[in-house]
Every structure is written in C-alpha cells, then in structure tokens.
Image: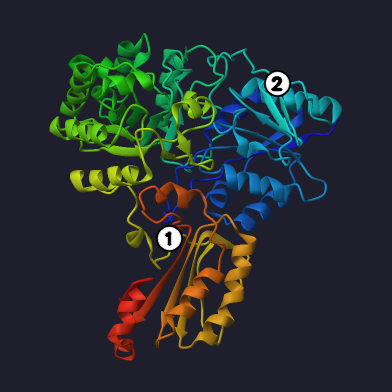
Amino acid sequence: MSAKITILFVQLPIPRLKITVEDHNIPVAALYLQAYLREQELAQRCEFRLLDPFLQNYGADEVILREIRAIAPDVICFSLFCWNVERSLYMAEQVKLQSPAPLIFAGGPEVTPDNELLRHSAIDAYVYGEGELTLQRLLESYLATGRVATDVLGTLRFDGAWHIQPPQTRAIDINAVRSAYLQGLVPPGRWQEMYIETMRGCPFACRFCYYNKQCGDTRFLQQEAVLDLVRHALAHDYSGLFLLDPSFNIRPDLETLLRKIAALNPERKLKIATELRADMVDEHLAQLLADAGMYEVELGLQSIHRDTMRQIGRTQSLKKFLRGARAMLAQGIETKVDLIVGLPGDDLDKFKASARWVKREGLDGYLQVFCLSVLPGTHFRAHASELGLNYSPLPPYYLLSSPGWTPETIQEAFAWAEDYFDMAFEPDIDDECSLTPVLEGRLQEIVAGTPAQPPVYPRHAASLTKWHFSELEREDDLLRLLPILQQFTHNNPQSTYFVYLELTRPIAIDALIDFYAAAASLRQRFIDRDLGVLTPDETPIFHYRLDILLREKSRKNFPEQYLIALQEHFYVEWFA
C-alpha cells in the first residue's frame, strides 16, 4: 500500500444529564499515541486526526456517525472506557456498514482478555496494555500489506472465537517522546485544563484497580520534561494541570521537582490536582505541595479496617494517613477522601465505622463514596467466583451482592451516608433539567413544536436534545408527536435527552405513561446503571426523562386530584 492513509481517533464522552459549555472529555490517550506515532517512520504515510471535539462531545449518535463518514478515514481508533464502551461498539458496528468500511482498532482500560463485552466482530483488533508499540506494529503491517497482522503482541481479536496474543512486554521510553502539547497537537484554547502523566506504571497492586494491568515497570518523566509542560501551561493560560498519576508522591525526586514548580508558579496561578498516598505525606511535604500550586488531591482511604485492607491488597497506616491528610488540609489543599461500599471483608457496619472515622477526624469536606466496581482485568474480576462477588456484567460493573453485602445493604449504605454527611452522591436530576439553552450556533439543543405544527426532525440534533411540545390538550396530540420522537430514538439509541410536555388541559395519565414508554427504548444505558445503584427501583431510567410543564394561567383547568395523581408519575413544573 503506497497511498497516504487517514487515521481518526475517537473518544466518546461520559453521558451526562446536563450539558455545560465546559467539557472534560480530553482525548489524552489519542494525544499520547499521536505524539509517539508522529516520530516514527510510518508518519510519512499517515494523516492523524482527532474527531472534532465539539461534535464528539455534544453530538447525537447520528451526528457523530455522519461526521465520521464525511471524513472517510482508512482507520478508526476508539478509546474504550467503562462509560463509553457500549456506545463506541455501537458506533463501530454502524461504521462497518458503509462501503468501503474502515479498519477499526480499539484500546483503553476496557480492553482486557476477560471482558466479555468485547465479543464484537466490528473491531478488527483490540489493543491491550500500553498502546504505542502495539498500534505502531498494526499500522506498519497494514501499510505494508493492506491487511491487519494477526500475530502482533498485545492484541485481541474476536471472529466467533477469541484470538489472544501475549502481552507486549517491551515498554517505551516515555522520555523519548515529545509531549503532544509541545508538538502543538492540542487545539489551543479548547480546554482549560492540561492532562499529563508524569509516570507510567504503579508499584501497588490494589485488587479493585486495573491501572497497572499489562504495564511495564514504573517509569518517571524527567524533571525538565515535567517543567517544560508546566511552562507550557502557564504560557498558554491553562487554569489547571491535572496529573494523571496513580500515586504522584512516589517519585524519588519529588521534593526537588516541587521546589522547581513553585519557582515557576510563585503566585499559584496554575492550580494542580492529582492522586497521591496520604500516608507518605508529612507537614514538610504538604508545604511543598501547596507552594507548587497543588489545590486538590484524591486520597484512596476505601476502608479503615485492617482485614479489609488485606483482602483488597493495600497496606496503609491510619495514623500516617491522618497525619498526611491533616497536613494538606492545613495548607488549604482540598482532600477528596474516597470510601468504597461493597469491599470484600467489609459489611454495612464496617462501612459505617469507616464513615464515622472520616467525619470524626474532620476529613469529610470533600468526601466521595463509590460502589465497588468489579472491573475487567482486575484481581477481583479474576477471582469473583471464589470471593462470592456477584456483579453486573455491564458497565460500570457494580457489585450486586457478596458474602458481606446484599442489594438492600448496598442501597442502605448510600442512603445512610447521604443522611449522615448531609450530601448527595448523585446529581440533583431536577436541578439538571432545564429548558435554558446552553449550546449556541453549531448544534440545536431545544426542539419545540405543537400538535398543529410538529417540529421537523432536526438533522443537527445535540446529544442532549430537549424536546418541548406545547399546547397539548388531548391524547390525539400525543399521537401526532410520537413518531418524531420514535424516529429520533431509533436513530440515536445511545443518546441522552429530555421531553417536556406542556399541557393546557388534563390528558389521561395512562396515555401519558404509554407515551413515555412508546417514545423510546427503555433498555438501560451506562448512565442508568451508574446512577441506579442509589435507587431502590431495580430498573431506573435516567437517559430519557419526561417532565410535565403547566402554566399558572391554566391552573384552573386541572383538578387537584388530577395533579396529585400526575405528580405520582412525573415531575411537574409550574411556570408563568
């Protein structure tokens, strides 16, 4: 193959209930891969592209597919995370229907040999572990032969049966690759935060985590390379620098690096965030972190019980953890302490004891409580049967029950924690539903219509389309509007959206319920399972919501008993 090929990188966003003008779906993996591949010989025959971030992050399924087809890439590379793996596989399947169909590669945390979701023939090769060398070999074979090599280390294929190659054990020199930011690969002004790694690998082996799967030895970015990135962030007015390291403070040269960052960032204009080990922090190090501009750290406490810690593969001194957390708090650093519900060795009473300890010690200001996810590629996934871990086979793979936990006690743990800490661990859905438009110009966000003038189905719908149907008086009005929504949901099965029905007179509640069910597929998506852990309903739906709008001037048309019954099934909002 002699012609130049186009390689398109796609990373679909976390599904959200609320669109904002800010997005945090920064395609870090694609940027790292591009930075590496552009310095290889094959780059002379390749054009590397990122999918338009605006369309990627806000576009409905068909909008994204139309953009991909317009680009007509030869190769598409999807980054798979638990929040986008199902949608990405759907997109890959749809793209494969076109002719000629591109090659499709996929990598990311979701790619492990034990992930049953990957039994998908639309993907020509999965890349697991560190992706640079493996993707390079796949592209080199394609450029040389026009086909995908089947013997590349670190790849998986599924064509009715699994074909698994041994992992790629050779690790790249992360200091030999010039950063994507310094190469000018990141669109200027697109994001307010820089996301970088200052290390690869992790010396710890927490059994719920897959960070270090198929990863080489722990390697650190040299000081001057880190400082170059800090200088770049300051020169280009980035407000934040997020260090993607699992344990930032294990660097052997940490104190020297922090002093040099502080010299570059004396007014702490650049706010830095990361994850680190609190038990390795003392008052002196906390001062250095603050001087460098560290404003937020995530601390994985998970549980205070030693037997639980042993079962999850962690060693941690509570005394040292508390010392480090308090030292950072004293320096004004936000400490996000994590607790996990559902850990092997824990139960409801033990979780409550951990929570009470956190509150008693004053560490609950930025508390985060998660449900245990039995992630593919982790020790817990490999040993789920012997540990008695019953978990959802679909992302985010939440624990359903175990010897120490029942579905009821898992839900009780969250309900108790929300009450005990007086905070919510899920978004306020009512607050996130609004007819106020956020996007302007490139995508339509609100689609309005009436029975007399139903809206034309917009071909440029946003991923979170808000349908506003007004002046509804009778069941027939719903029937006129139903086909429009059905067409949208058929063409965009992975999108998230709201429907607002503005009633001027009572419409039978059964008819409204039937409309809700008929307008969309009620099959759960990632966002439903993610938020559903906090809901006693076994099959909550969050990706699609129907609200009722009533005008004050029409209040006299609605009997009180009708309003009471209506509010049992729908959120009702009065407006002027």
Near mark 2 (Cα within 10 A), the count class, few <14, some 14-19 or many ≥20, is: some
Residue under the point 55% across and 70% down: 519
Residue under the point 51% across and 75% down: 514
The reply to whether residue 12 is in sight is: yes
Near mark 1 (Cα within 10 A), the count class, few <14, some 14-19 or many ≥20, is: few
- Position in image of residue 360 (x %, y %): 13, 32
451 to the left or right of 557: right
Q: Is residue 382 above or below residue 259?
A: below
* Mark 2 or 1, closer to the camera: 2
User: Please, what is the three-letter code of the amino acid marked with disc 2?
Assistant: Gln
Kindly indicate the quadrant of the structure image that contains residue 250: top left
Residue where numbered disc 1 is placed: 438
Q: Is mark 2 on a helix, strand or loop?
A: loop
Q: In this view, does 116 lie above or below 37?
A: below
Q: Are marks 2 and 1 in contact (CB under 8 Å)?
A: no
Question: Which residue sits furthest top?
Answer: 252
- Position in image of residue 90 (x %, y %): 65, 49
Residue where numbered disc 2 is placed: 165
- Position in image of residue 217 (x %, y %): 51, 11
Kindly indicate the quadrant of the structure image that contains residue 32: top right
User: Please, what is the three-letter code of the amino acid marked with disc 1?
Assistant: Val
340 to the left or right of 97: left
Q: Which of marks 2 and 1 is nearer the N terminus?
A: 2
- Position in image of residue 63 (x %, y %): 62, 57
